[in-house]
Amino acid sequence: MKRTGICPKCQHNVLWYVENVAANEEAGLMQQHPTFQLAVTGNGSYGRAGSTEAYVCQQCGYIELYLKERLTADGKHVRELRGSRGAPYRG
Ligand SMILES: [Zn+2]
């Protein structure tokens, strides 16, 4: 959807692009327009990372979220997982 501009669910071609996904929480006076952050990083009140952007289908409402920055894998709050390639899925 990000690359094609086409909704993968209903094939509609008119989308909304949301540059900064909002955080739906009260953030106090310091931050007037808090943005949604994907990860808690454990450093006090500013301990969050992972700004996001969204593409939304205007017809069916399907949403795709994308990270706008790379995360740091600290092994606690964010862990890196690596799947094995080549072996067929045997669910
Ligand atoms: Zn759609």
Image (cartoon, rainbow, N blue to C red):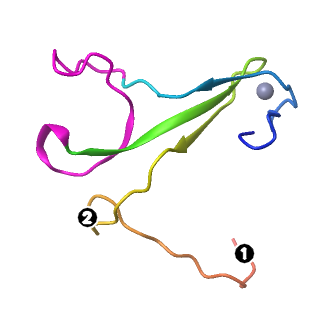
Image quarter (top left, top right, bottom left or bottom right) of the N terminus = top right
Where residue 89 is drawn, which disc sits there? 1
Q: In which quarter of the image is residue 59?
A: top right
75 in the magenta segment:
no
Instruction: Examine the rendered structure and indicate whether residue 20 appears above or below residue 59.
Output: below
Element type at marker 2?
loop
Q: In which quarter of the image is residue 24?
A: top left
The residue that appears at 85% across and 29% down in the rendered structure is 10
Instruction: Examine the rendered structure and indicate whether residue 29 appears above or below residue 83.
Output: above
Badge 2 density bin: few <14, some 14–19, many ≥20, Cα 10 Å: few
Where residue 76 is drawn, which disc sits there? 2
Instruction: Examine the rendered structure and indicate whether residue 50 appears above or below residue 33.
Output: below
From the viewer's perspective, is the residue at label 2 or at label 1 nearer?
A: 2
The residue that appears at 69% across and 29% down in the rendered structure is 62
Image marks 2 and 1: residues in contact by CB distance under 8 Å:
no
Badge 1 density bin: few <14, some 14–19, many ≥20, Cα 10 Å: few
Magenta stretch: dominant secondary structure? loop
27 in the magenta segment:
yes
Chain part drawn in magenta: 24-46
Q: In this view, does 64 lie to the left or right of 13?
A: left
Element type at marker 1?
loop
Please name the amino acid that badge 2 sits on: Lys
